[in-house]
Amino acid sequence: QVQLVESGGGLVQAGGSLRLSCAASGRTFSRYSLGWFRQAPGKEREFVATINRSGGSTYYADSVKGRFTISRDNAKNTVSLQMNSLKPEDTALYYCGAHGSNWFPRMDVREYDYWGQGTQVTVSS
């Protein structure tokens, strides 16, 4: 079992930056690959970024590549998403997810086993 709690969301102007964090409970954190997804009002949850168990491999959606960076600290049971050059279209509820599969990367919400409650990111123009 893994419990995930996101933090760090807020309101920022276009071009600004935010850093999201996701804290995980449990002693098996390093056994899970982690991902960030987002969901805008009226839209489906979409993939943003993912990182493998060791942190040595990452994968990004084309829409955020070059602007967002995912990282993890297995000693602290945390995963982060550094978001730079934010755009109004990045506005969404951001979720942290975890899965225990050996396959990487996984970008489908159905492939994730655990989710946090989400943190809101709003980018004003």
Image: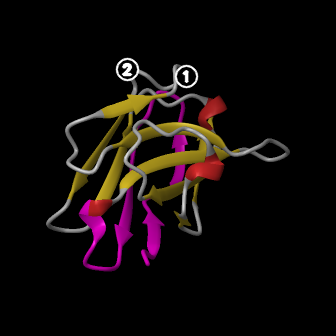
Residue at 35% x, 78% y: name it.
25
Could you tell me if residue 121 is visible in this image? no
Classify mark 1: residues with Cα within 10 Å, few (<14), some (14-19) or many (20+).
few
Residue furthest front as drawn: 102
Q: How is the image coloured?
A: secondary structure
Please give the range of residues in magenta.
Answer: 1-30
- The picture places residue 114, in percent across and down from the top left corner, at 53, 66
Classify mark 2: residues with Cα within 10 Å, few (<14), some (14-19) or many (20+).
few
How many numbered markers are drawn? 2
Describe residue 58's horizontal placement relative to residue 48 as left or right: left
Determine whether 116 is above or below 39 in the image.
Answer: below
Residue at 46% x, 57% y: name it.
99
- The picture places residue 48, in percent across and down from the top left corner, at 52, 37
Determine whether 68 is above or below 71 in the image.
Answer: above
Residue furthest right as drawn: 42
Q: Nearer the viewer, residue 65 or 83?
A: 65
Q: Quadrant of residue 57?
A: top left
Asked whether 2 falls inside the magenta stretch, the response is yes
Q: Nearer the viewer, residue 26 or 38?
A: 26
What is the distance, in whole Å, between disc 2 and disc 1 at their CAs? 9 Å
Q: Quadrant of residue 77?
A: bottom left
Q: Which mark is residue 63?
A: 1
Label 1 near label 2: C-beta < 8 Å? no
- The picture places residue 98, in percent across and down from the top left corner, at 45, 59
Question: Label 2 is placed on what type of residue?
Answer: Gly
Q: Which mark is residue 1?
A: none
Question: Label 1 is placed on what type of residue?
Answer: Ser
The residue to which callout 2 is attached is: 66
Residue at 57% x, 38% y: name it.
47
